[in-house]
Every structure is written in C-alpha cells, then in structure tokens.
Image (cartoon, helix red, strand yellow):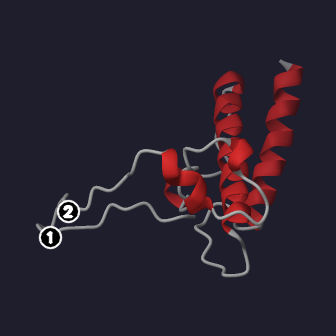
Amino acid sequence: MLISTRSWSLVGIALRHALTLGLHMRSVSRKLTDVERENRVRLFWSLYALECSLNEVCGRPPCVADRDIGTPLPLNIEESDLRIGSVLSDAMEGVQSLDTSSSSDSAGGTRSGKYQFP
C-alpha cells in the first residue's frame, strides 16, 4: 500500500505540472508543430490515465475534474510515425476518416465532425 500511495503522490505532482503547463487545454499556438501538439496531447492523457488507475487502487480522489479537460484524444497513429518536422496529415493517410459531416446536432442544425489536429 505504501508503494501505491507514493506512486499516487508522484503521478499527482506530474499531473499538476501538466495542468500548470496547460496540457489539459486544446493548444491553438502556431508556434507548435503538429508533432509537438500531438506529443503534448499524448503526455497529458498518459498522465491522466495513470492517475485515474492509481485513484482506484488507492481509493483517493482525482486531482483534475473531467469537465476541466479540453484537450482532444490522441490521434490513432503509430508513435513511430511521429517524427520531428513531419506533417501529421501525411501519417493519417492510412487511418480511417472520422468525417461525420452529415450528422446533426441537438439544435437541429448540421455540424462538421471532421477531426481537427490538436
């Protein structure tokens, strides 16, 4: 139990640092490349998933509420395709499209369901 409590504490610190860096929010900065954005998304979701698992093991509360998370889920591409300087749209060629542009929202209008890079 002591090891899991220490793990919970350390992962909580790492997750709070990620929150301080704004990794829980969608990045709109033009200074970041697609690969850098995707790495930030993957880092946040990895920390979040680990913290949720440790919360269950330790019976502790989470340090971030789901409603505070605005970052998208990671892209469904292999990590080996994430190369510095590469464009992620090139790596997405073999991935099934998430285009649901014919769907309608609850207000009766149509919405574009095309995935936007984080």
**Image coords of residue 99 (percent x, y):** 33, 56
10 Å crowding of disc 2: few (<14), some (14-19), many (20+): few
Give the quadrant of the C terminus. bottom right
User: Relative to residue 87, is residue 108 drawn left or right?
Assistant: left
Q: Which residue is mark 1?
A: 109
**Mark 1 residue type:** Gly
**Residue drawn 69% across and 48% down?**
81
Q: Which residue is mark 2?
A: 105
**Mark 2 residue type:** Asp
Residue most toward the bottom?
30
Cβ atoms under marks 2 and 1 closer than 8 Å? yes
**Image coords of residue 111 (percent x, y):** 25, 67
Query: Looking at this view, is 41 or 66 the one in front?
Result: 41
**Residue drawn 66% across and 79% down?**
29
Residue most toward the left?
108
Query: Considering the numbered disc 2 on the image, is that residue within a helix, a strand or a loop?
Result: loop
